[in-house]
Image (cartoon, rainbow, N blue to C red):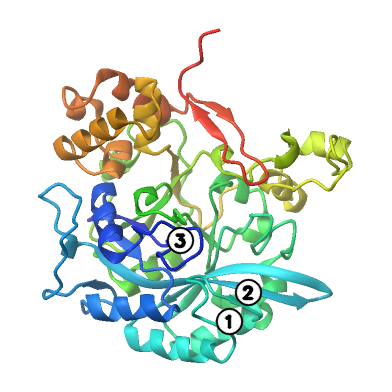
């Protein structure tokens, strides 16, 4: 089978998250989005960990599902969706702030555990390091290398993926407090790092300009703080969902597959290939944001409404032309700094990827109304009920399969997204960018 997985989310116990970010709403929205496997997020937080233990059970594959005895009253999905079909993978994002090689480092890492027992062992180790109750994404004075060591001690099947690796403030390669390589960060344990998360502001093409990243599989996740934002970036797998299958598939990578661009029916085109084997555990690729929509794509200074591309930043000597303070150097600029290639080059780990924008944004653009309007929500839920889950609408179903079950203007807008015919307004310094599908009338 082909299935989608979102491996980086947050619960209601993380700062600046929706109060709806509970297990039921995460599973419900995963169903609506078409996500088979969703991360628990935040398992180091004692209250959230207890909710996981009380509500979920191990399914025998290293993943979790709702207990048969669990009762939920607020399932917002269409009636045909069964929340017990959704699988959870044990995961937490750790914020490590520490000093190394003469600089303060602020690195976010995703930690995955294969079962509840290893989760408990790992949490017990971290309790001696810092306060796990203050935030679902705990802030610890713990070297990333030592964090990895502790995870492997809890279980040799555990693994760590550095999160949103280019984000300026909190990431492995970030301009403000990161390193210049994986090896500089993880030292003698670097061989245990086999994947990196691209983040919303970068895509595989950008990363494949840096040859030192050739040996790493690139995964993409939503990093959502609200269940409705699940799947804005996601991973595509084949096979049966299991912890070992996901870990193996990510570690193997995409086996050097050709990157696809401007394909009208992207995932469907792969599924129809005579060599496609949906029963084999494999990492097929990712659904990506247009990186320009990410909030750190270009450089800038939000307070002064200054947004610059890397060339313009260089002319300004990295200083804001309005206030004279240092600019926040974004992802594109940092990629330029570390890249040793003019163009992306495939590696043995390269996989397929497709740029998409969330269906709500597609509908909003097509109907020329706000994303939070009642009309957009009605059309969205009607499409989910009549056609199927969002990620399948975006990347699998053909137009003729959806004709008559969605407004023609929405299907036209969807085709623009699939073909890459969009208008981009890049994000900067914490400000999300915009992707427009239709030019505004003068």
Q: CA distance from mark 1 to mark 2?
A: 8 Å
The residue under the point 81% across, 76% down is: 101
Q: Is residue 262 left or right of residue 25?
A: right
Secondary structure beneath dot 3 equals loop
List the residue tagged with mark 1.
147
Q: Residues within 10 Å of mark 3 (few under 14, many from 20)?
A: many
The residue under the point 19% across, 57% down is: 74
In the figure, residue 171 lies in which quadrant? bottom right
Sequence order check, earlier mark of 1 and 2:
2
Q: Count the marks.
A: 3
* Mark closer to the observer (1, 2): 2
* Mark closer to the observer (3, 1): 1
Residue 192's spot in the image, x, y percent?
55, 77
Residue with the most extreme top position: 442
List the residue tagged with mark 2.
96
| Quarter the N terminus occupies | bottom left
Residue 72's spot in the image, x, y percent?
16, 65
In the figure, residue 63 lies in which quadrant? bottom left
In the figure, residue 116 lies in which quadrant? bottom left
Secondary structure beneath dot 1 equals helix
Residue 254's spot in the image, x, y percent?
44, 56
Q: Is residue 355 left or right of residue 85?
A: right
Secondary structure beneath dot 2 equals strand
For the residue pair 150 and 1, the one nearer the viewer reads as 150
The residue under the point 56% across, 43% down is: 294
Q: CA distance from mark 3 to mark 1?
A: 24 Å
Rendered image: mark on residue 253: 3
Q: Is residue 301 left or right of residue 320?
A: left
Residue 158 vertical position relative to residue 252 in the rendered view, above or below: below
Whether residue 13 appears in this view of the structure is yes
Residue 9 vertical position relative to residue 137 in the rendered view, above or below: above
């Amino acid at each position: 089978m082909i299935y989608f997985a979102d491996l980086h989310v947050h619960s209601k116990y993380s700062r600046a998250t929706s109060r709806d970010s509970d297990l039921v709403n995460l599973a419900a929205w995963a169903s609506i989005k078409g996500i088979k496997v969703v991360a628990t997020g935040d398992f180091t937080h004692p209250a959230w960990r207890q909710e996981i233990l009380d509500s979920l059970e191990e399914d025998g594959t290293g993943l979790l599902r709702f207990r048969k005895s669990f009762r939920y009253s607020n399932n917002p999905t269409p009636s045909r969706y069964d929340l017990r079909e959704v699988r959870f993978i044990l995961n937490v994002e750790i914020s490590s702030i520490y000093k190394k090689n003469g600089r303060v480092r602020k690195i976010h890492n995703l930690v995955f555990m294969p079962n509840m027992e290893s989760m408990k062992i790992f949490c017990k180790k971290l309790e001696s390091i810092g306060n796990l109750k203050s935030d679902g994404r705990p802030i610890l004075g713990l070297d990333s290398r030592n964090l990895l060591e502790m995870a492997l001690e809890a279980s040799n099947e555990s693994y760590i993926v550095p999160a949103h690796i280019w984000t300026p403030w909190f990431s492995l390669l970030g301009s403000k407090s990161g390193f210049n390589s994986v090896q500089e960060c993880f030292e003698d344990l670097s061989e245990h790092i086999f994947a990196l998360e691209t983040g919303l502001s970068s895509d595989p093409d950008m990363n494949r300009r840096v040859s030192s990243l050739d040996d790493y599989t690139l995964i993409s996740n939503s990093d959502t703080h609200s269940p409705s934002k699940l799947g804005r970036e996601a991973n595509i797998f084949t096979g049966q969902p299991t912890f070992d299958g996901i870990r193996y598939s990510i570690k193997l990578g995409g086996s050097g597959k050709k990157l696809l661009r401007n394909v009208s029916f992207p995932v469907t085109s792969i599924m129809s290939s005579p060599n496609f084997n949906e029963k084999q555990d494999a990492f097929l690729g990712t659904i990506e944001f247009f990186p320009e929509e990410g909030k750190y794509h270009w450089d800038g200074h939000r307070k002064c409404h200054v947004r610059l591309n890397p060339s313009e930043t260089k002319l300004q000597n990295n200083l804001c032309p309005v206030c004279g303070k240092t600019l926040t150097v974004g992802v594109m600029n940092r990629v330029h700094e570390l890249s040793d290639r003019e163009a992306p080059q495939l590696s043995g780990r390269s996989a397929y990827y497709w740029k998409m924008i969330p269906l709500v944004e597609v509908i909003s653009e097509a109907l020329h109304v706000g994303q939070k309007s009642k009309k957009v929500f009605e059309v969205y839920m009607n499409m989910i009920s009549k056609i199927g889950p969002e990620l399948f609408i975006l990347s699998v179903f053909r137009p003729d399969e959806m004709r008559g079950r969605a407004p023609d203007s929405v299907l036209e807008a969807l085709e623009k997204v699939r073909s890459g015919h969009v208008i981009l307004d890049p994000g900067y310094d914490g400000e999300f960018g915009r992707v427009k599908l239709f030019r505004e009338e003068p």
